[in-house]
Amino acid sequence: MKHFLRMFLQVCLYFYCKCLWRCLKFVVRKLTGQCELQRICYNTKPGAARTMKIEASLKGSKSKRLQTSVSVHPDAIEKTIDDIMELKRINPDINPQLGVSLQACLLQIVGYRNLIAEVEKLRREPYDSENPQHEEMLLKLWKCLKPNSPLKARISKQWCEIGFQGDDPKTDFRGMGLLGLYNLVYFAEWDTEVAQQVLSDSLHPKYREVTKKELSQLSKAEWEKKKFDKAIGYSFAIVGINITDLAYNLLVSGALKTHFYNVAPEAPTLTHFQQTFCYLMHEFHKFWIEEDPLDIMEFNRVREKFHKQILKQLQNPEMALCPHFAASESLINM
């Protein structure tokens, strides 16, 4: 009975708040002469803050046409904008900038949904050693990471040198499918210097520098032990596949909207996702060194802590995880 009453009160509170919110919106529109979409576009600067408010407004609308506008085909966005302007009784000649702003927001919203579908398709496609394209990508990964060490055979223990678990990497891609390979190849090909350095450090790990404050807090016995402790490395390729999983979950959960809506002037693409993966790999590497784990068994703890840190950063509506990839200066939803 208690449970039923609690549920009943929650339902009543939900409908009360919903009705109150609609009444408030009606009053504000009468006072300002602007609908909610206009107020958002005119009072919020371009980027994630604006696009996420527009998305929430459209999804929360009582109009089915507005609700479905966030899932239209990219080619139908212009017509959708016309429909929104007509439905909201907004004269495009008097408000020309509104159409431009709404179009840019919808391109980002629809693009994000399409990116999830594209990434999911790659994740579900298994690595096929009989597919020449898959094999070519795998060999490219080796050449980018180890340009001065020719691969002696396709099935070889050499693969362990770049962090695979056995002599045939295809078995390691089962969790993330082709997506893991795509990300690793992108990192190795387009951020080669960083990728090679991260690989080298993972094989020959170094301690982070101990600060004077930390040193003063160590007892003599702890310091003697630390001097002889060995820094812990990790398997580069396996961690890359694991970070692919982290990036995938950030994308699907919607957490990456903040980042993509700030860096992609229009629709976020697979390239934006792969750039984000490069950033996460580099940052995780630094985080691993900073955490200074006792052994590789601490990987899940370190990963989870890193995940929480990234989520916290993404709660900031102005956050761009990798600003050097940003296109914020060319945002068109002004």
Image (cartoon, grey):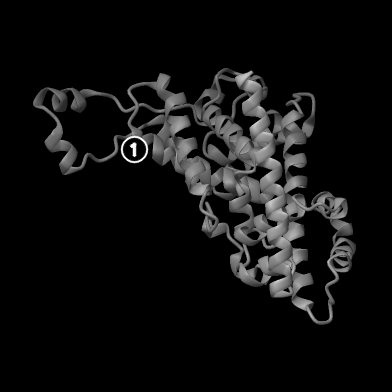
Q: Residue at x 89, y 68 (%)?
A: 86
Decide which of 115, 151 is in the foreground and name it: 115
Q: Quadrant of residue 154?
A: top right
Please report the residue visible at 55 percent of the width from the left and 27 percent of the height from the top.
238
**31 lies above or below 258:** below
Q: Look at 60% across and 35% down and name the residue there.
A: 244
- For label 1, the crowd category at 10 Å Cα-Cα, with few meaning under 14, some 14 to 19 and many 20 or more, is few
Q: Picture coordinates of residue 310 (x, y %)? A: 49, 42
Q: Is residue 85 left or right of residue 216?
A: right
Which is more toward the observer, 285 or 261? 261
Q: Tell me the kind of residue under disc 1.
A: Glu
Q: Quadrant of the N terminus?
A: top right
Residue 102 location, x and y as percent? 76, 65
Residue reaching furthest left? 220
User: In the image, is residue 45 above or below residue 120?
Assistant: below
Q: The C terminus appears in which quarter of the rendering?
A: bottom right
Judging by the rendered image, the residue that carries numbered circle 1 is 290
Q: Residue furthest bottom?
A: 94
Expressed as whole percent of the image width and height from the top left, the position of residue 327 reads 61, 63
**Side of 54 where 166 appears, left or right:** left
Report whether residue 326 is seen.
Answer: yes
The image shows residue 97 at horizontal and vertical percentages of 75, 76
**Disc 1 secondary structure class:** helix
Q: Taking the image as drawn, is residue 332 in sight?
A: no
- Residue positioned 62% across, 27% down in the render: 6
Q: How many marks?
A: 1
In front of the other: 192 or 172:
172
